[in-house]
Image (cartoon, grey):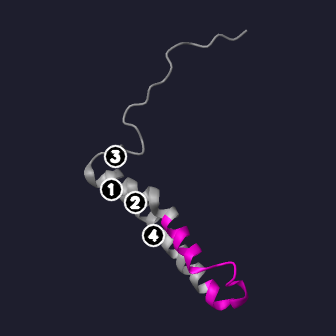
Amino acid sequence: MMFRMQILMLLLAWGLPMLGGYGLHVFKGVFPSYSILISEFNITLFILVAIFRPTKEIAKLLNGESRRFHPKKIDFPTREVRTC
């Protein structure tokens, strides 16, 4: 179950920047006065930078090198805290 959720979150982290880039492209077409600020290069750069880390994590996950999001063992401190 955790593996499926991890894959889903990584795919969403990869897909949502694509959807945002498409939204910027549509915005550029609807409002031509803003085409000076939003160029095709800016949209492409936004998508590439936004999907770089999720793509790296998906590659690690497919190679079996990725750690789970939640550790299996949680270490709690064993010393008691004195109060004055």
Q: Is residue 38 magenta?
A: yes
- Residue at mark 4 to residue at mark 2: CA–CA distance: 10 Å
- Residue at mark 1 to residue at mark 4: CA–CA distance: 15 Å
First in sequence, mark 1 or 3: give its number.
Answer: 1
Which of the numbered marks, if any, corresponds to residue 15?
A: 4
- Residue at mark 2 to residue at mark 1: CA–CA distance: 6 Å
Secondary structure state at the residue bearing disc 2: helix
Q: What segment carries the magenta color?
A: 27-48
Q: Is residue 50 left or right of residue 3?
A: right
State the image coordinates of residue 4 (x, y, percent, origin top left).
34, 57
- Residue at mark 3 to residue at mark 4: CA–CA distance: 20 Å
- Taking 21 as reference, is 54 above or below it? above
Q: In percent of the image, x 61 and y 79: which residue is there?
A: 39
Secondary structure state at the residue bearing disc 1: helix
Label 2 Cα neighbours within 10 Å, binned few <14 / some 14-19 / many ≥20: some
Secondary structure state at the residue bearing disc 4: helix
Whether pointer 2 and pointer 1 mark residues with C-beta atoms closer than 8 Å, the reply is: yes
Residue, disc 3: 66
State the image coordinates of residue 34 (x, y, percent, origin top left).
71, 83
Which of the numbered marks, if any, corresponds to residue 59?
A: 1
Q: Quadrant of residue 6?
A: bottom left
Check disc 1 and give the amino acid type. Ala
Label 4 Cα neighbours within 10 Å, binned few <14 / some 14-19 / many ≥20: some
Whether pointer 3 and pointer 4 mark residues with C-beta atoms closer than 8 Å, the reply is: no
Check disc 4 and give the amino acid type. Gly
Overall secondary structure of the magenta section? helix
Residue, disc 2: 55
Whether pointer 4 and pointer 2 mark residues with C-beta atoms closer than 8 Å, the reply is: no
Q: Judge whether residue 82 can be spotted in this image.
A: yes
First in sequence, mark 3 or 4: give its number.
Answer: 4
First in sequence, mark 4 or 2: give its number.
Answer: 4
